[in-house]
Image (cartoon, rainbow, N blue to C red):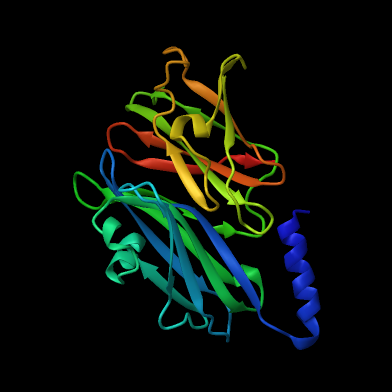
Amino acid sequence: MRPRAVLLIALFLALLPNLAQAAETRNIPVVTQIQGATFYRTSVTLTNGNEVITTPVVMEFSYRSPVDNSFQITTMTLNPALGPKRVRFFDDIIQEFKNAGLIRATDANAGLYGTLLVHFEALDIRREAGAVARIYSAAPGGGTLGFAFEGRCFCAVGTTDRALGGGRDGVFGNDGSTRANLGIVNQGDASGNGATDARITYFDGSNGNQLKQFFLSDVIGRELAANEVYQLNNIFNDAAIPSTTTTLVIKVEPVRVDWFISAYVVQLDNTTQDGSFFYLFEE
């Protein structure tokens, strides 16, 4: 069992005689408001599934400034608190932070992406807390194109060993072609603190041969801060990957001992920019 889970269980057992309410933190690995192939925004849906408890909710947005490369953390408290059997929806969560004056002036007009921690401070059990993100963009014929994913319990997210998964590139049946982006998130140590590097290895999905191994710091010139995400876009567009390679097995490992790391792949349609999101498996 991971140290975070042990600490949370011990705390829960210690508080049982007082029938204290529990806190839950949901981890959303990436939220965006940024111009890429299209303009991407992120909606967030928060749910309190408890029958009677109103819970305070605090959202913590962490991002790397595109203006001066500094790492920023800002928080927003939900007002009013989230009542029992209630849902709160934000169609652009980063704009909510900007509108509230919680993004520093230097970054207020910049495209941003980062991680979001959602702290539900008073519930009976963790499963009563819900956080779902959807990254989307305008569709050419009206409406939106996008993909949704669940915010996972921060107590269990990440691995100290390796995250594994696959990605593909090129034609998609008779209907177009696709590309892959890889996101890496430093979840910190057992308490969620501290910077680390990540070792990334690509294997040819058709024969298992190793094509490339590198440290993320060699690409971005630094380690990842705790709760920082970095996304490598169009990962097949790499000199180390032959043009004939259409599938990759991806391995991501934290460099520091007992540090938690997670990763995800976004598979994007090259024409519509519609995406599909999945986490790499964590060992």
Give the residue at x 49% y 83%.
83
Q: Position of residue 227 (x, y in %)?
A: 53, 53
Give the residue at x 51% y 80%.
56
115 on left or right of 126: left
Residues 259 and 18: in front is 259
Residues 223 and 156: in front is 223
Q: In which quadrant is the N terminus drawn?
A: bottom right
Q: Image quarter for residue 11?
A: bottom right
* Residue 135 vertical placement versus 256 (above, below): below
* Residue 219 vertical placement versus 121 (above, below): above
Give the residue at x 28% y 37%.
272
Q: Position of residue 159 (x, y in %)?
A: 67, 45
Residues 259 and 182: in front is 259
Q: Position of residue 209 (x, y in %)?
A: 61, 14
Looking at the image, can residue 31 be seen? Answer: no
* Residue 105 vertical placement versus 47 (above, below): above
Task: Tell which residue pokes out farthest to the left in this image.
Answer: 141
136 on left or right of 198: left
276 on left or right of 6: left
Looking at the image, can residue 116 be seen? Answer: yes
Q: Position of residue 79 (x, y in %)?
A: 40, 81
Give the residue at x 31% y 31%.
270
